[in-house]
């Protein structure tokens, strides 16, 4: 056993010992997320942007809006795509190169949570059916990593969308042409909020920090919409969840999500 793995085992033993007492390493309650700060207009030249900090995890997201060809089977809907990238400076374990499976999963989970909530009304982002639509691209960059990138990237993308303004286009000689005038907010129907929970031993914790993330046996990310309906779920890790644990996680995600949604509503109100 290497010295690194010995240290990891000691950390996990300490974390588990505290959880047995109903405590966490940073003093939070088991169902308490870290402090969240949201700053919009972090990238002045983007159509919308946000910088989100969850504890020491920091993510910047920029939204780009432009005309695009519709997907072949969705000529009556605009396009929405999320991407994610980890900067090498964000954590010693991050290396340069193409995205690995973890980063690909990160982008897909964020994309799915927003997409399945129907946050963006894509039917209103059509320039001409089957010919040209509006594409909304939310690109998240991790600046600093200390656990739970799923929620950090999701909140950054959601806040960036809420702060976005979209230009208007019309078809002129089969070419999408910009219409002069004031930009409009993206058509938003709901505010999705993801809540990621980790399982360590038999304990469920909300928003695991870096040390807790490395000690998890399993994780689950559940996204709910403004009505409290669960619209997306992703499970990871080597261990599983019992049916009762999944029900408990669903209840926690809706309760904690409602609290975080109030912060995002402030973004929408100030957009």
Image: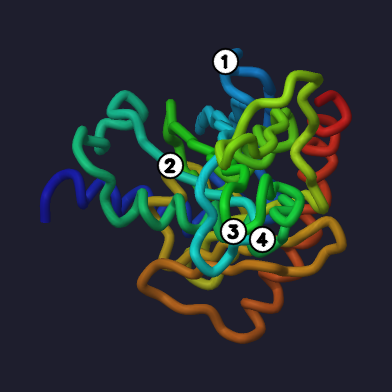
Q: From the image, which quarter does the C terminus lie in?
A: top right
Q: Secondary structure at mark 1?
A: loop
What mark, if any, has residue 76 been given in the picture? 4
Percent position of residue 181, x then y: 79, 19
Q: CA distance from mark 3 to mark 4?
A: 6 Å
Percent position of residue 131, x then y: 57, 52
Question: Crowding near pointer 4: few (<14 within 10 Å), some, many (20+)?
Answer: many
Mark 3 or mark 1: which is in front?
3
Q: Secondary structure at mark 3?
A: loop
Q: Is residue 262 above or below residue 247?
A: above
Mark 1 or mark 2: which is in front?
1
Question: Crowding near pointer 1: few (<14 within 10 Å), some, many (20+)?
Answer: few
Q: CA distance from mark 2 to mark 3?
A: 29 Å
Q: Secondary structure at mark 2?
A: strand
Report the residue marked by disc 1. 45
On the question of residue 17 being in view, the answer is yes
Q: Identify the residue at horizontal 63%, vertical 67% (top origin).
A: 232
Question: Crowding near pointer 3: few (<14 within 10 Å), some, many (20+)?
Answer: some
Check contact, mark 2 vs mark 3: CB within 8 A. no
What mark, if any, has residue 130 been given in the picture? 3
Report the residue marked by disc 2. 84
Q: CA distance from mark 4 to mark 1?
A: 29 Å
Q: Nearer the viewer, residue 180 or 109?
A: 180
Question: Crowding near pointer 2: few (<14 within 10 Å), some, many (20+)?
Answer: many
């Amino acid at each position: 056993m290497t010295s690194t793995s010995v240290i990891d085992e000691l950390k996990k033993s300490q974390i588990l010992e505290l959880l047995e007492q109903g405590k966490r390493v940073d003093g939070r309650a088991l169902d308490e997320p870290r402090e969240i700060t949201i700053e919009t207009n972090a990238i002045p030249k983007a159509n919308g942007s946000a910088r989100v900090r969850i504890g020491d995890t920091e993510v910047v997201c920029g939204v780009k809006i432009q005309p695009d060809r519709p997907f072949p089977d969705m000529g009556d809907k605009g396009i929405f795509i999320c991407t994610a990238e980890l900067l090498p400076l964000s954590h010693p374990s991050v290396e340069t190169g193409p995205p690995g499976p973890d980063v690909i999963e990160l982008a897909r989970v964020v994309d799915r949570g927003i997409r399945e909530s129907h946050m963006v009304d894509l039917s209103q982002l059509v320039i001409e059916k089957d010919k040209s639509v509006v594409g909304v691209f939310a690109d998240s960059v991790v600046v600093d990593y200390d656990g739970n990138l799923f929620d950090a990237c999701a909140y950054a993308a959601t806040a960036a969308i809420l702060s976005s303004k979209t230009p208007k286009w019309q078809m002129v000689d089969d070419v999408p042409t910009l219409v002069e005038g004031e930009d409009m907010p993206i058509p938003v129907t709901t505010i999705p909020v993801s809540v990621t929970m980790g399982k360590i031993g038999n304990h469920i914790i909300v928003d695991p920090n870096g040390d807790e993330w490395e000690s998890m046996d399993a994780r689950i990310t559940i996204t709910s919409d403004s009505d409290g309906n669960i619209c997306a779920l992703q499970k990871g890790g080597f261990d599983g969840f019992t049916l009762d644990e999944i029900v408990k996680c669903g209840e926690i995600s809706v309760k904690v999500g409602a609290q975080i949604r109030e912060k995002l509503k402030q973004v929408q109100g100030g957009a």
